[in-house]
Structure formats: structure tokens, C-alpha cells
Image (tube, rainbow, N blue to C red):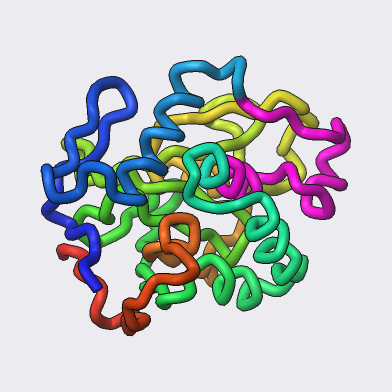
Amino acid sequence: MTHLLARSRPHRLDGPCLLPDRHQGSPESRFLAGLATFHAHPERLPRYVSENRTEWPRRADNCYSFLFHVAIARGLMTPARARQLQSRIRPGQPESFRSVMFPEGSKRLSVQISGEVARIPTGPIPAGWVVSLDGGAHVMVSTGRLTPEGRHEVVSFKGGDAVTPVWGDSLPEDPHPRLHRLTIEDELENLLRDDQDLSSLDLRVGPSVLTRFRSSPSSPSSPCEMNIGS
């Protein structure tokens, strides 16, 4: 199977698609174009059904369900298929989330923490790959870009603003989530400033079921084969 390589030029959320020609029209390109549409037109974003954040994990309106919504909107998945996949995700069971979201496997990344600063010692994460924090506790999508400081840019769907932690007691009740362009490191540091313990954080990345057709004839790849630059 041909993966979107780390050296590929990523899709821009603020401009035309910059993926190499061989990836134009690819599932990754189509999925990122869907995110770009919602980023440019926030009025089209789905709204949380409930204003009570404690109910979000039990409803089809959380961060990973939004990504299924994008896949449906871009013709990458049928609503019935999305419902079937999400029904297999068990709350509080990260492995059930990973088995659904990463059918070809995922790569666990190490995180270096010093005070309230987080560092991820790896190269670019391919555009369109899903980034998972502790299973489905929070998920993001890589844009394939590194900042000048070497931080990994992602698109993160959440309530609050860019510095709002994605979980914890400081998470506001916000029925109007939005897409944020920031970095994985930003989200980790938001949690650290909220005194969240990340010592056992399970940070994983990989090509997701969102951009893999069910009938694909390709054989699953081992996580150790994933090409992420260092």
C-alpha cells in the first residue's frame, strides 16, 4: 500500500491543495479539503446536540464523530458505515477506539515534558493522518506541516478557544465547537497548564479508517513500516 509520505507537501487550510500531483484526488486530499471547507465556513459546522459536556461521549457529536461527519460529507464513507464503526467504540476503552480508527495500525510517539513545555522528537506527520490522545479522549488531524520551531501542526475540533484544554475540570460547557489550527504540542501544553498528568499519555498517529475504503484490496501495514521522519 502506498502511504502519504512524510516528505509530501501538505494540504493548506488557507490556500489551494499542495499535495503532490500523485495525491490529488486521493482520500487524504479529499478529507483535508473537507476540513478546509469547515475551517473557512464555520457556520456549516455541526453543533453539539447537548450543552452538557458530560453527555458528549454518549452522543454522536464529539471530536472523533465530527471527523466521521467530514468523511461522509466528502463521500469517503456512508452514514450507515459511520454509525456501524462508531458503535464499536466503547467509552473508556482506548483500545476499542484504536482498533476502529487505525485498522492498519498506528505508531506511538514519545513525548518529552519539561515543566509546562512539551516536545515530540519526530519529523513531520503525514497530512491527513489522525492524531490520537489516549484513544478517543481527543483526536486531531495532521496537516503535514512543521512550524519553524519544529512543532507539529494539526486541526483540532473542540469547544472554547485555542488555549482551552481538551479535557479536565477547566473544560467549559460550549455547545458551539470550532476548528482550530494549532500544534499537538499546543494541545499538550494546554493540558499541562491545567495540571493534567501526561506521564502515561498514549499519543498515536496513523492513516485512519476515515480515508481507507472498506473494500480496499491492500494488505494492512505494520505500524513499524510507517514512514515518519525523525
52 or 171, nearer to the observer: 52
Which image quadrant: the N terminus? bottom left
Tell me if residue 171 is in the magenta stretch. no
Identify which residue is drawn at 61% across, 36% down: 158
Residue 188 visible somewhere in the drawing? no
Residue sitting nearer the eye, 192 or 146:
146
Q: Residue at image x 16%, y 63%?
A: 229
Q: Find residue 12 and report its image quarter.
A: top left
With 114 as the anchor, is 124 left or right in this view? left
- Nearer to me, 134 or 216: 216
Image position, residue 44 (x, y; %) = 60, 21
Query: Which residue appears at 42% of the width and 63% of the height?
Result: 212
Q: Where residue 41 sits: x, y (%)?
A: 51, 16
Residue 31 lies left or right of residue 8; in this view the side is: right
Res 100 visible? yes
Q: Is residue 97 above or below residue 42?
A: below
Q: Quadrant of residue 53?
A: top right
**Residue occupying image coordinates x 48% and y 74%:** 103
Query: Which of the pair 6/109 is nearer the observer?
Result: 6
What residue span does the magenta drawing correspond to? Answer: 45-69
